[in-house]
Amino acid sequence: MTSRMAAAALCAVLAGCAQNYPQNAQEFRQMLPGAFMGKVQTLEAKRPLREVARTFEARAPECLNVSVRTISQTSTSYQNILTTYKATVVATAQKAELHLQREYKGGGVIVPGKVPPGGLYMLVADATPIDKGRTRIDIYSPSMGVDVIIRAISGWATGENLGCPDMTKAS
Amino acid sequence: MGDRRKPGLPRHDQGIVSRHAALLLAICLAAGCSSIKTYQARGPDNVFVSSAISKMRGAVHVHDVDADCRTAYAGTVQLDRPEIALSLPPERPSYLVFSFEGSSLFSGSTSMSVGTLVKPRPGYRYELAVTYRDSIYNVALRESDPRRASSRELPRRGLQDCKGL
């Protein structure tokens, strides 16, 4: 729950209290580095960009286009929230981008601002070539609650683990 | 399991359920009102599921799929051994839903599921490698022909791919 609050805090900070959420991946990249609870991390994969891009294209839709239903109940409250994730991969000869968006339905979740189609941006991963056999991955994300997603993306990039993240562990 | 759905039914959904809800479910199961039943063999074993699951309980829920891609729950097998064998009807699609359930003090009970269609060919052997470790899971399907000693990896297919199977 702490990480969920952190994600909410990040959204609020990114919104700048003016409900100004990033409307595309580029805005997300620009707003995140200076944001509270925002994090940019870099890793290196010893694989060519085209292989990294191919893995992103194969794994991201299968693993990340999912819905998570969260039901929490106490003696005084009941909440049922459906969270839908949407992954988009944009690959060119120079770069591969993985965008992950999240949209909430139900449970009284109110997003005070304009939500872009597909949901709020929660993570962007950019893969760019270092040389013929190595690729740099820059991941823009909240600093909490997305560890399992980042581990999965790192595994896809390096080719060491092609498994999917259990999105019930993301928040 | 999805809410108000057959056991483990095919939704690319993953869910987090509170401890209270899990307790209610446990009471319901203990009272014998569960709709979960053990999958009964329907011929020779042709699907072999190997699993390596850490800190979660795993199960596979088998659903028959008709020509109109409608599903009918056929039964469940717990993944409580490193390898289990299933006999799925050949030449007909079945939808296998793998579920992983666990609980922790802070997050309560969690469950998630992932499904894949399988349409066994007569005489072929199917191997499913299911892993769940550190919140990363994988389900890999391989078809092999014992007569030719050849095999190939098959993609995971959702119910939306049923018509083209």
Image (cartoon, coloured by chain):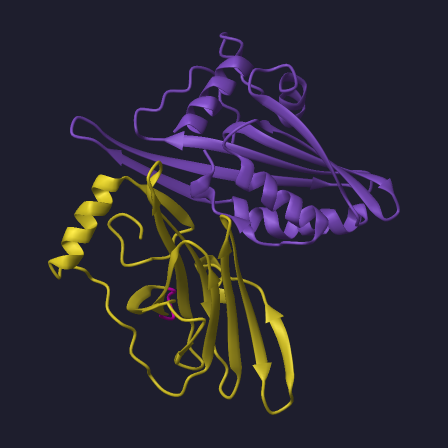
Q: Residue furthest left?
A: B31
Image point (70%, 53%), residue name: A159
Residue farthest to the right? Answer: A132
Magenta-drawn stretch contains B79: no
- Vertical arrangement, residue A9 with respect to residue A133, above or below: above
Residue B21 visible in the picture: yes
Q: Is residue B25 left or right of residue A43?
A: left
Most frequent secondary structure within the magenta stretch:
loop
Chain B tint in image: yellow
Is residue B66 in the magenta section?
A: yes
Residue A83 percent across, percent down from the top left: 41, 36
Q: Quadrant of residue A141?
A: top right
Tell which of A41 and B121 is nearer to you. A41
Please give the name of the residue rendered at 28% of the width and 59% of the height, measured from the top-left corner. Answer: B7
Query: Which contiguous range is marked in magenta?
Result: B65-69
The purple-coloured chain is labelled A
Instruction: Name the one closer to the observer, A93 or B149.
Output: B149
Q: Residue at x 45, y 56 (%)?
A: B54
**A11 w.r.t. B126: above or below:** above
Q: Is residue B120 above or below residue A114?
A: below
Residue B162 visible? The answer is no
Front-lying residue, B115 or B160: B115
> In the picture provided, is B43 more to the left or to the right than A65?
left
Q: Position of residue B148 (x, y in %)?
A: 64, 89
Give residue A130's position: percent from left, percent from top: 85, 39
* Position of A42 relative to A108 (above/below): below
Compared across the picture, whether B164 is left or right of B63 comes to right
